[in-house]
Amino acid sequence: MKQKEVKYKKNPSVVLREEFDDWGVLFDTEKGEGFCINPMGIYIWKQLDGSHTNQDVLKVIKNTFEDIPNDVEAHVNEVIEQLVQHELIL
Amino acid sequence: MNNTLKDTQKQSSTPQIDLPEGVPALQTIYFYITEGCNLKCRHCWLAPQYDPKGSKYQNLSLEGFQSIITQAKDMGLHSVKLTGGEPFLHPDITSMLEYVKQEELRVVVESNGVLVTPDHAALLKSCKNPFISVSLDGANAETHEWMRGVPGCFDAAIKGAEHLVDAGFKPQIIMALMKQNVDQIEDVIHLAEDIGAGSVKFNIIQPTSRGKQLHEASENLSVAEFIELGKWVEETLSKETKLRLIFSHPMAFRSLHNLFGENSVGCGLCGIKRILGVIYDGSYALCGIGEAEPDLIFGHWKKDVLKDMWITHPIINQIREGLPDKLEGICTKCIMKNICLGSCVAQNYYQTKSLWSSFWFCEQAYEQGLFPTSRLKPQGETVADEELII
């Protein structure tokens, strides 16, 4: 299966802590590792429920936000790749 | 969306150097070059001797300064910080700056500004990627001089800062906060704008040396007041000025966008594993704390080969191996500990004689229920997927 067709799901041992400025921390309770995540990253994270591909996430973002940069797809893919890399999503 | 995800454990990369595996580069040396100071600041964490002319007390020799730099260059040295006492009080400050320039090292200077001349400013500006801070603890002479103990030092500090601006610097203004001057935060920002500064840093007074006396006399602000001030500076005042505003409370209290965002002011991380202090008598130490804590002196430039000391000294190795895992107290609960490293090991050791103690500010905040809960490790917390779906 192509990576972009994968429907990622949150790692159940990862906790999201959202803060007052809409930034947050993803904390892997098993590894004891924390990752700071910005508001758009949190939005993407929240879409990853096991039923959305990268393209689905991209579509939601395009339908939700204004002034989307031209290279948004590359950014979305990059964020998801980082989440995978750190096993924050499976 | 660039840099969306930041590893809160990431530390700076190690350059290739000729040291055994596992021994980090010695990237920066903090030189506390003078025992004396031309001011008598009531909050100073080092409490140098009052010495308006720089002739009464000990200074690090130029020979020692050059020898240490020469040795350290083979160990990955790329920058030095010159502080004191007051570095411009040192009789060889010009030669020291010329040497740093010749060796193409980055230079950072912490000064009270009073003795800065146009020649100093020009020479410093010609060094590699220089940075200088000037202390201003009030927006008027009355407050600044009450804090710093010497009449006339306010106008002299402004003049010094202006010389730096004339030389092309945008100096950083540093304001130490206490009850007496806390109502002048905005005025100091405006003054810094007028001078042509690039940033203003607000420091918490540490309970060390003279600062300890201030804490005991309750002249210091409370942790609760600092936390509120920090939010006000970061979230309100920083939007009203073009200057970068840095509030130096521990990382757990700073907003994530301020630490990692596009216009972040950075982590302010103490690179303790890659830094060494050298104090005015030529001793190697953890940092300036060596002046108050003999336990944290590691050797002397005349007696010890720097590289041997850096590789073998037991305390340096304990810090290398123990931080951050051995940190105790609130640090065991804090998700920022891997990048915060206990905020200030020197301060922690001064208070408790342990390298692994947590920082007093964080501990007090936790005891008072003021520690940000989002920065505490989850305790048996689970999050069901459906709770997170929009």
Image (spheres, coloured by chain):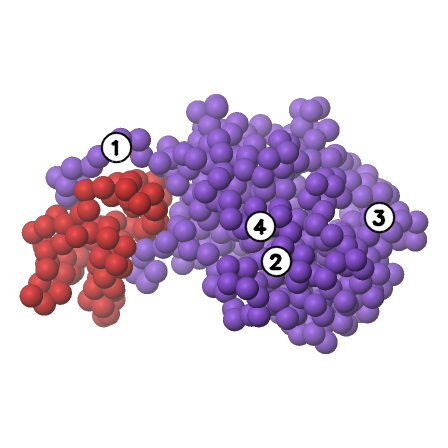
Chain colours: A red, B purple
User: Which residue is at 10% across, 60% downward?
Assistant: A6
Q: Are marks 3 and 2 on the same chain?
A: yes
Mark 2 or mark 4: which comes first in sequence?
Answer: 2
* Residue pointed to by mark 4: B317
Q: Are marks 2 and 4 on the same chain?
A: yes
* Residue pointed to by mark 2: B311
Q: Amino acid at mark 3?
A: Gly
Are circles 2 and 4 on residues that touch, CB within 8 Å? no
Mark 1 or mark 3: which comes first in sequence?
Answer: 3
Q: What whole-number distance in Å separates the C-alpha atoms at marks 1 and 3?
A: 53 Å
Q: Chain of mark 2?
A: B
Q: Indicate the position of residue A55 as horizontal and vertical percent values.
A: 11, 62
Q: Indicate the position of residue B302 as horizontal and vertical percent values.
A: 80, 59
* Residue pointed to by mark 1: B381
Q: What whole-number distance in Å separates the C-alpha atoms at marks 3 and 4?
A: 31 Å
Q: Indicate the position of residue B7 as horizontal and vertical percent values.
A: 37, 54
